[in-house]
Image (spheres, rainbow, N blue to C red):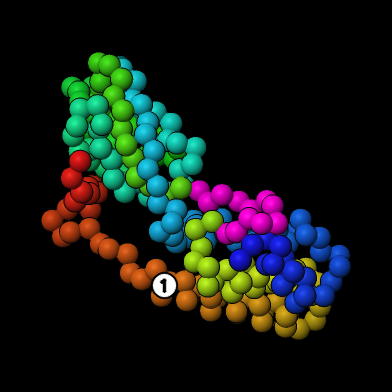
């Protein structure tokens, strides 16, 4: 469902001309960003490459990176790369960060990828992770990463709740319309969770401090 259709549904429900299309679009993009941050949406899983410079120990993650580095491979040296979940674990294992190449272990902290060993020449890694959704701008844009059957239930109800939260601000008693639409939005979240199912867990033999993939390079 595109922006034009979604916006029209919000306008029809709210019946308040003080809310511009820009406000409604901002609310729907806010919702999309929150959902992508909370849930692992399959269509947002992607891969990109980064280059670990010779003599370096860290490199910026791709600007599209949002969360969850699932798998990494060293393309230059044709080897798998282990992923440590915490920087403290990484530094405990590599306190001097001076291991011999190739790059075979990484850890993400914020927007930075730390790696060991230290390459003598640049080595390229391919990373698989959850990317940021592309925000909607034009009338024909559609929500990036969300299943189509939930576009209206999620984005329209969220945007309506945002509008009614302002409309009903300061009133005595419960915010009736806000509560109505936030409840509908929460019901849609349950549908999304059911659609996504339970994410796979790491095998029991993998230490909690370390995450590796079962894929072959």
| SS at circle 1 | helix
Residue in the picture at 72% in, 83% down: 176
- On screen, 169 above or below 50? below
Name the image quarter holding the N terminus.
bottom right
Quadrant in the rendering for residue 174? bottom right
- On screen, 188 above or below 134? below
Quadrant in the rendering for residue 196? bottom left
Residue in the picture at 40% in, 59% down: 42
- On screen, 123 above or below 185? above
Q: Which region shows up in magenta? A: 132-143
Kindly give the residue lying farthest to the front in the view shown.
Answer: 140
Badge 1: residue crowd in 10 Å (few <14, some 14–19, many ≥20): few
Residue that carries the numbered disc 1 in the rendered image: 195
Kindly give the residue lying farthest to the left in the view shown.
Answer: 205
Q: Position of residue 214 (x, y in %)?
A: 19, 51
Q: Position of residue 180 (x, y in %)?
A: 66, 82
Q: Position of residue 201 (x, y in %)?
A: 25, 62
Name the image quarter holding the C terminus.
top left
């Amino acid at each position: 469902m595109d922006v034009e259709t979604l916006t029209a549904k919000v306008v029809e429900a709210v019946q308040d001309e003080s809310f511009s299309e820009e406000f409604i679009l901002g609310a729907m993009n806010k919702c999309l960003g929150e959902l992508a941050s909370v849930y692992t949406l399959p269509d947002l899983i992607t891969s990109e490459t980064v280059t670990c410079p010779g003599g370096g120990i860290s490199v910026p993650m791709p600007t599209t990176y949002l969360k969850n580095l699932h798998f990494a491979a060293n393309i230059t040296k044709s080897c798998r790369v282990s992923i440590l979940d915490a920087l403290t674990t990484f530094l405990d294992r590599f306190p001097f960060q001076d291991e011999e190449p190739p790059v075979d272990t990484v850890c993400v902290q914020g927007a930075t990828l730390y790696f060991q060993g230290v390459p003598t020449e640049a080595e390229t890694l391919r990373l698989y992770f959850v990317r940021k959704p592309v925000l909607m701008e034009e009338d024909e844009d559609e929500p990036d990463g969300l299943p189509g059957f939930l576009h209206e239930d999620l984005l329209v109800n969220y945007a309506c709740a945002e509008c009614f939260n302002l409309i009903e601000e300061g009133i005595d008693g419960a915010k009736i319309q806000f509560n109505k639409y936030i409840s509908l939005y929460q019901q849609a979240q349950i549908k999304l969770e059911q659609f996504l199912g339970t994410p796979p867990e790491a095998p029991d033999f993998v230490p909690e401090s370390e995450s590796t993939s079962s894929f072959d390079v």
